[in-house]
Amino acid sequence: MEILHSPVVEHAIRLAAVAHQSQKRKSSGISYIAHPMSVCLILTKAGFHNEDILAAAVLHDVVEDTDFTIEQLKEHFSGEVIQYVSEMTEQKESISGEKRSWRDRKQDHIEVMQQATLGARAIELADKLHNLEAMLFDLQSENKSEFWGHFGASPNEIIQYYRSMIDAAGQSDQQLETLVQNCNARLDELKKYLP
């Protein structure tokens, strides 16, 4: 009998739902938890069924975007989940506590992905795919200039970042090919909306 439920993923969903409960998505204003849940669903549809990867997908923004720390996650999840979440977490502040620029954060994260585990790279691609899908959806219902104003970079910088990250995470890996192809197709669609 195939197991259709994972207590590890359920625990991750509950923790992420609480951690993100007051947050909304930038452009649409919908509850933030819709994003990590969508990333998890994308991975499942792409053939990833490892519970550590799926749990990390649900938790991938918890450390980066909430007060929850990696040390707190260690109390609840395996070393594999912690590794994937760590690889997914951008360093938003410098060692001295100053806010880092969008460009510095993104460049560092691309470099991390070039060396990351397969699980983290799969999560990264699913994250980018959902972000691109959401951006395209939002652009249909929002003024273009208002939409691009939600980000800390120019539209061309955003496109270039996504292209570089897809390349860094994909790395011509056969297991990630479907995710890479879908990301690239959505990115090409998004380019049509450049101002």
Image (cartoon, grey):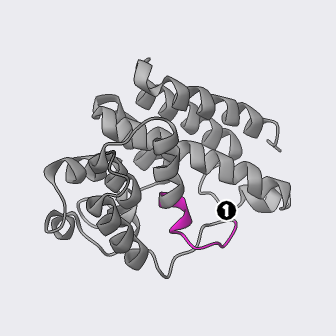
> Residue at the spot x=52%, y=45% of the render?
42
Relative to 94, say whether 186 is above or below.
above
Front residue of this view, candidates 120 and 111: 120
Q: In which quarter of the image is the C terminus?
A: top right
**Left or right of 156 on screen, residue 92:** left
Q: In which quarter of the image is the N terminus?
A: top left
In this figure, which residue is indicated by the disc labeled 1?
A: 150
Local SS, label 1: loop
> Residue at the spot x=49%, y=82% of the render?
22
Is residue 112 found inside the magenta-colored segment of the image?
Answer: no
Judge whether residue 107 can be spotted in this image. no
Relative to 156, say whether 154 is above or below.
below
> Residue at the spot x=68%, y=30% of the render?
185
The x and y percentages for residue 149 are 71, 60
Span highlighted in magenta in the image: 28-36
Amino acid residing under circle 1:
His
**Left or right of 194 on screen, residue 111:** left
